[in-house]
Amino acid sequence: MAVSSVNPPVRRVRRTPDAARREILQAAREALEGGDAADFTVAAVMSRTAMTRKTFYVHFADRGELIRELVRPLRAELDVMIGHWSGAADPVLAGAEALRVAARMYTEHATLLRAVWWTAAQDPELAQARAALLAPLAAVGTKLLIERRGLDRDRARRVAHALATMNVHVLLELGPSATATATDAAVDALREIWTSVVLPAPG
């Protein structure tokens, strides 16, 4: 009797919606960290999963929503940190602690944050994600510069944006394998700069 050469049907892996969403987000992180903005497409993300491109749109409206979800946990961490800083009685002391927390976050998520930051110039949706990560620090900087230096709002915003951007670049340089010594040195340098700019000028 002849043996059938027909392959058995491939069994589909059934996932819960949450599991499918997590798998897509993990694939997106890997795609973003491993390439550049031009390669970060829905097709490239889904090729790293066992799901179809059509399935992507069951869980995400578009690529922009995917990017926002990818950085949302980081933004949530920043919001908590900035909230403690903004409402502190001693903003200098609280700011030093906020910088230490930020340094830990940037070390832990260094590869993803570098990918978002360095590719944002090529990609408007990644640029929005970068702006969302920068906004909380710039906002508290603006508030402190108005309250403690008496700067007008427009000038305070420009100075705060420059300070926040400096923070990001210094912390991104630490990388995922930063030593405690390197991290402490970066935090101390940033604290010195923030303190000298935010505190009222002498005399």
Image (tube, rainbow, N blue to C red):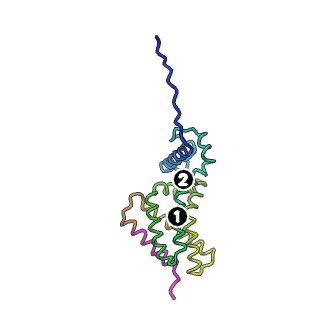
Taking the image as drawn, is residue 87 in sight?
Answer: yes
**Given the current orientation, which residue lies at the most extreme top position?**
1
Residue ranking furthest to the front: 16
Q: Relative to 133, does residue 197 appear above or below in the rendering? A: below
Residue 191 location in percent, x, y?
A: 45, 73
**Residue pictured at 42% horizontal, 72% vertical:** 188
Q: Amino acid at mark 2?
A: Leu
Q: Position of residue 130 (x, y in %)?
A: 56, 59
Q: At 46% across and 55% down in the image, what residue appears? A: 111
- Residue 39 in view (yes/no): no
| Magenta part, dominant SS | helix
Q: Earlier in the sequence, mark 1 or mark 2?
A: 2
Identify residue for label 1: 78
105 above or below 1? below
Magenta segment boundaries in residue numbering: 184-203
Q: Nearer the viewer, residue 143 or 37?
A: 143
Label 1: element kind: helix
Q: How many marks?
A: 2
Marks 1 and 2 sit apart, C-alpha to C-alpha, by 14 Å
Query: What residue sits 58% from the left and 79% below the top?
Result: 147
Question: How far across and down, in percent of the image, does residue 21 sit?
Answer: 55, 46
Residue position for label 2: 70
Q: Are marks 1 and 2 in contact (CB under 8 Å)?
A: no
Q: Is 80 inside the magenta-drawn segment?
A: no
Residue 162 as seen in the image, left or right of residue 106: right
Give the quadrant of residue 183. Answer: bottom left
Which mark is drawn over residue 42? none
